[in-house]
Image (spheres, helix red, strand yellow):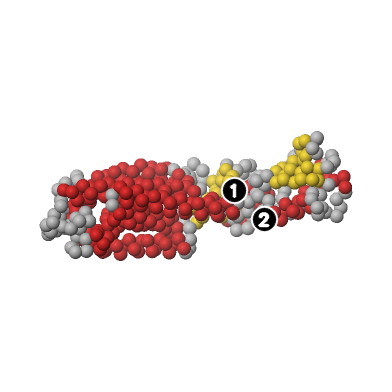
Amino acid sequence: MEFFPIGRVYDFMGQRRLFAVISAIVILGSAFLVVWPGPNLGTDFKGGTELEVDFPQGVTTGQIREAVEAAGFATPEVVAVEEASHKNRYLIRVQEVSTISTQKQDELARLLCVGDKPAPDCAPEKVATELKVSPGGDKIAVRYREAPDLAWIRERMKTVSGIAMREGENNPALVSARDNKVEISIKSKGDQLLDGLKEKLGPGKAPDKALRVEWIGPKAGAQLRDSAIQSIVIAIVFVMIYIAFRFDLRFAPGVVLSLVHDAVAVMGMFVLLRKEVNLTTVAALLTVVGYSVNDTVVVYDRVRENLGHLRGATFETIINKSISEMLGRTILTNATVVMSLLAFFVWGTGPLKDFSLALILGVLFGTYSSVYIALPLTWWLDVTFFNKGGSGGSGGKKQHRPQKKTAAVV
């Protein structure tokens, strides 16, 4: 069975106004959703700490959220991971990160007798010359002038709010006797969150360790978010330049509008479905941009071939014939891609599931935009700017022999 029998020409351009309205509604609606309520940004973009944990016994999201709040974390987000083999697996996200702020580092320096403004009870033999904090906020290194008193350092660290040392006899530890360098291991926010779960739920109900712990600072998250937007914009700009050189200047705006439509529509669907937007989503959007332009280029190439074969035909007729010749193959190809992606969507988990969903939506929107956005805009540019004297263009040139439309409407 053929979707579009060979030799039959369909009047796709006859429905351009209807689909222009539909496309405008999709773009404006998606843009509105992106602004309000806004995307559900993941830890990659908004910063924070994320844990994936598997509870040995059944718990509810309410119980987990209550335990996390009792551990001192504000506005936690608890999401159940939908997996048939792991019914008690959850993602826990909090806004707090393990990095130690500048203010907290100043407080540590004062209590550990570092710098020009040590605590009043700092004796001369306890004065330190240097304090360094690891980028992850899990280690503090202090260099003293004389041999340090580790027990005294341990007691001083207990008075610092918001920072907890890891348990163990060798913490703090003298890592260099020659330089009097002490290293203090700090519990990360993930460790503190797990301790809070054990204390509130009990050792039997709480997990012993996290399956995965990720964190990113708010500044780094904002930089990643800006870089993601820039990468999508740059990709679209380079695609426009390529199309302008590969075909004709009038073809480029149609590609750009169709790519923007696809990217915004996929993002709008993610907001509507409250899916998490992270670096994986950005990778999917860039893939959508590349795949969508492939569909458009295939049809554009057939349009360019028919411009040479059908010199007396109107540009509208050429577009209808080109789409009719290519759409059957495009549907079969894209249907095969969607069937492959459905396997990942149905049986995949976590980021793989969302990645496949974004690609499925992108393929569907890309097929639609190639036919009802890119080519109608190209036709309008040809009529408006390249062939003002006639009802249609013939490759940007004046028609030699106008013909009536021969498209069969179905």
Q: Residue at x 63, y 47 (%)?
A: 190
Q: Is mark 1 on a helix, strand or loop?
A: strand
**Could you tell whether 207 is left or right of 226 in the image?**
right
Q: How many numbered circles are shown? A: 2
Residue 370: x and y, percent? 29, 53
Crowd tier of the residue under label 2, counting other residues whose Cα lies within 10 Å: few below 14, some 14–19, many 20 or above: few
- The answer to whether residue 103 of the structure is visible from this angle is yes
**Could you tell whether 79 is left or right of 404 in the image?**
right
Q: Residue at x 54, y 46 (%)?
A: 89
Query: Foreground mark, 2 or 1?
Result: 1
Location of residue 76 (image quadrant): bottom right
- The answer to whether residue 372 of the structure is visible from this angle is no
Residue 194: x and y, percent? 64, 47
Q: Which residue is drawn at 41% across and 43% down?
A: 344
Residue 297: x and y, percent? 29, 48
- The residue to which callout 1 is attached is 215
Crowd tier of the residue under label 1, counting other residues whose Cα lies within 10 Å: few below 14, some 14–19, many 20 or above: many
Mark 2–mark 1 contact, CB under 8 Å? Answer: no
Mark 2 or mark 1: which comes first in sequence? Answer: 2
Q: Residue at x 33, y 56 (%)?
A: 253
Q: Is residue 138 above or below residue 103?
A: above
Q: What element carries label 2?
A: loop
Of residues 31 and 65, the one nearer the viewer is: 31
Location of residue 72 (image quadrant): bottom right
**Could you tell whether 30 is left or right of 79 in the image?**
left
Disc 1 residue type (three-letter): Trp
Q: Which mark is residue 72?
A: 2
Q: For the C terminus, which image quadrant?
A: bottom left
